Amino acid sequence: MLGSGVAIYELTKTEIRSLGETTFADQGIAERGDLQRLLREQIDVIAPDTLIISEEFCEWEDSRKRIDLLGIDRDARLVVFELKRTEDGGYMELQAVRYAAMVSNMTFSRAVEVYGRHLEKIECPDDARASMLQFLGWEHDESGYFGQDVRIVLASADFSKELTTSILWLRNCGVEIRCVRIKPYALDGRTLLDVQQVIPLPEAADYTIGVEKAQALRRTVTSDRIQSRDFSKYDVTIDGKLAEIQVSKRGLVLMVAKIALDRLPWNTVLTVLPSARWLILEGDLEEVQFKRRAGQLTAKQGGKYDLARYFCDEENLLHKEGKTYALSNQWTGTAAEDAVNKLLAMLPTGVFRYSKSE
């Protein structure tokens, strides 16, 4: 087993006591009824920044094949979860790869339908489309960037050597697959969990070269995609004076947002930049205060806010009516120019102008 030799200890003032290893079966924890259900509600335990959109997904002809949990991450990638409570993981990697292939063509609209049925099943009143857009930080469906990759997360009490060999080979071939060990321990009638990502292993020296080749392959694919996207820069004039040159799309949106918040009512700005695009805190806060308090918040979909996805630097925080605002920096496609043009239409003529840089 991959986890042989691993031990958890309790430290007291009188002794260092080894906790007794146990199994989920011995603790009466069922794979589907307990482990899967609990991880569905707290998926950040094994996969931070993930939104679960379906449980026991089986919308194909063979209903015996079911994805334990299906999610999306903040990069709009589908995430297939395969869970086992056994000590060797079984053949979960083969199942997961099959499932990943079966959902690889899922579109944004299809994902919304799937998520809607999941919300109904768990009796959650949230709107599926609005919740997914908010989670992704999108203002509208940017389907060209949805589901371009599928990630796999395997979670088990342990993993056999045969299984880990297969997984490392798959990773070397460019498959984005991770293993998370969730090992139970017994302590005074309670069940404790040791949760650790075991693959990719930083100490897997025998596979370093292979992993680097796989990463190089993924970088090449990503580069090809990036080259097909629009990375235009803009020159900006404010009140008739040249203010900035070579501004990115996200920077352009931020500059207009600053002008709009200064000269327009907040509710007017919200019609163009909805609340899902902002991280808003009470009080007139400086950068350190803002980041500390924001880091303590829990996002609506669970987990912590990823502050790297917002303009949180001191010079970019916005202040109005006793609140501090951080605008999302996730702007792609035509969404940036659309937002800018809508805000400019509400501002006096000549206040803000922009043109593509040479």
Image (cartoon, helix red, strand yellow):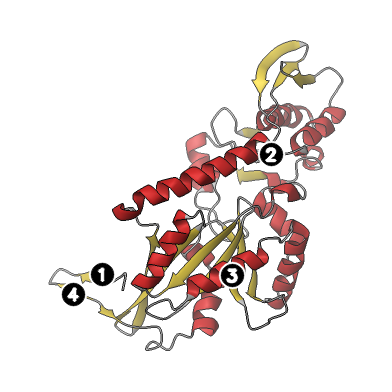
Foreground tag (4 vs 2): 2
Q: Where is the N terminus found, in terms of image quarters? A: bottom left
What's the residue at 33%, 53% (across, down)?
202
Residue 235: percent from left, percent from top:
71, 18
Q: Which mark is residue 17?
A: 4
Q: Is residue 323 visible?
A: no
Foreground tag (1 vs 4): 1
The residue beneath circle 2 is 331
Looking at the image, residue 8 sits to the left or right of residue 130; the answer is left
| Amino acid beneath label 4 | Arg
Count of picture labels: 4
| Amino acid beneath label 2 | Trp
Count neighbours of disc 3 (C-alpha within 10 A) and say few if under 14, some if 14 to 19, many if 20 or more. Answer: few
Foreground tag (3 vs 2): 3
Foreground tag (1 vs 2): 1
Q: Could you give the CA–CA distance between mark 1 and mark 2, rounded to whole angstroms?
A: 45 Å
Looking at the image, residue 43 sits to the left or right of residue 128; the answer is left
Q: Which mark is residue 98?
A: 3
Q: Could you give the CA–CA distance between mark 1 and mark 4, rounded to whole angstroms?
A: 14 Å
For marks 1 and 2 on the same chain, the one whose residue lies earlier in the sequence: 1
Is residue 148 or residue 69 the one in the foreground?
A: 148
Is residue 346 or residue 246 the one in the foreground?
A: 246
**Residue 154 against residue 208 in the figure, above or below:** below
Residue 323: percent from left, percent from top:
64, 40
For marks 4 and 2 on the same chain, the one whose residue lies earlier in the sequence: 4
The residue beneath circle 1 is 6
Q: Where is the C terminus found, in terms of image quarters? A: top right
